[in-house]
Image (cartoon, rainbow, N blue to C red):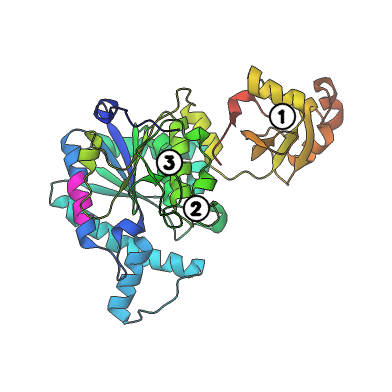
Amino acid sequence: MTQSDVNRSAFLKDIRRVVIKVGSAVLTTGEGLNPDAIDRLATQLSALRDRNIDVVLVSSGAVAAGRQRICERTRQCNKEYGDMASRQAASAIGQGRLMHDYDEAFAKHGKVTAQVLLTRSGLKFRDRFLNARNTLERLLEWGAIPIINENDTVSTHELEFGDNDTLGAMCLGLTGADLFVNLTSADGVFDRNPESNPDARAIPVIEDIASLDIEAMCDGKTNVGTGGMYSKLRAARRAAQLGVPTLIVSGKGAFDIPAALDGAERGTLVLPESKTVSSKKFWLAYHDDPSGSIMVDKGAANALLTKGKSLLPIGISAVEGCFDRGALVFIKDPDGEELGVGLTNFSSNELERVKGRRTSELADIIGPTSFDEAIHRDNMLLDAAI
């Protein structure tokens, strides 16, 4: 599971573009934004830019900044922010404050920042995804430091990334980065939850993250909350599939990102997988939440897993959910285990009519089609980290 003798400095020496995600636990105090944390972060990321390393920052903190602003100006410091409208309103107030503080902190080092607000729906369509990629590429060419956050003001629950760990992982494919640094309040990853297991051991290197039971390590994904270690390990698993290593390292106190990139034994290094997926497959698997499921028989499961085949209607045994053509869906084996995800060529209604039928029968059942596959292998990612 782990390998402690990896030469970190040799492994990380050729990094040229890094996505750094920082959460509210690092950036804020009980009163709001922590200016010392922002200054330290700006100093260290500016040092990376001075090494000609492109830096993309995925930052939380807008809601906390909004709460702080409301308290300062209205003295209404006990407001509740449990509902979405309140969090979105606080974020709308706080985004300007957060960017102002970042802009001033980076300006001390002669660096220019750029605000980039993304929504999941904005990355759902391939042309918009590519347009966002081109914009970020130009910003990096100019030497600017893009600061990315979810556009909370217009996001709905169905379109949320869910947490900035997920957004950070999506930005790897968006920017073509070769390292993901996830700054957290913990000193890396432990073999068990250290809060409930005092004898939990730190893991310096994770060689094969796909082999980990991350739900068990985190006491179940439903208990750790948005932005907890579960979401960080899931994001690292996705990065590994893309061929990108992840550093999960403490961003509290006197953290030192340049030293970590130079090989200092800080936090946990998650190694990439040897067999990686394309940027397109990464995008199609993680741009959206699956809308339903397609159950396949044993023969189809074997063909998908061992022969790299597309999924044909004859191999489908059941359909769950209601979805249109082009939707992202789970692919499950006869025992209900998830094999992966893919973009379906047929709606759920059409699949109910053609499941278990031969390709030659499709036209008679649903009319002429331009494809025979229910899910083409090029639009499928097996063993997806959903």
Secondary structure type for disc 3 = helix
Among the 4 quarters of the image, the one containing residue 102: bottom left
Secondary structure type for disc 2 = loop
Which quadrant of the figure contains the C terminus?
A: top right
Q: CA distance from mark 3 to mark 1?
A: 28 Å
Q: Nearer the viewer, residue 367 or 290?
A: 290
Q: Residues within 10 Å of mark 3 (few under 14, many from 20)?
A: many
Please tell me which of labels 2 and 3 falls first in the chain. Answer: 2
- In the image, residue 27 above or below residue 78: above
Residue 122 belongs to the span the image colors magenta:
no
Please tell me which of labels 3 and 1 falls first in the chain. Answer: 3
Residue at the far bottom: name it. Answer: 75
Task: Tell me where the magenta segment starts and ends, as one range.
Answer: 38-44
Q: Which residue is mark 3?
A: 169
Q: Which residue is mark 1?
A: 374
Q: Which residue is mark 2?
A: 162
Please tell me which of labels 1 and 2 falls first in the chain. Answer: 2
Q: Nearer the viewer, residue 364 or 183?
A: 183
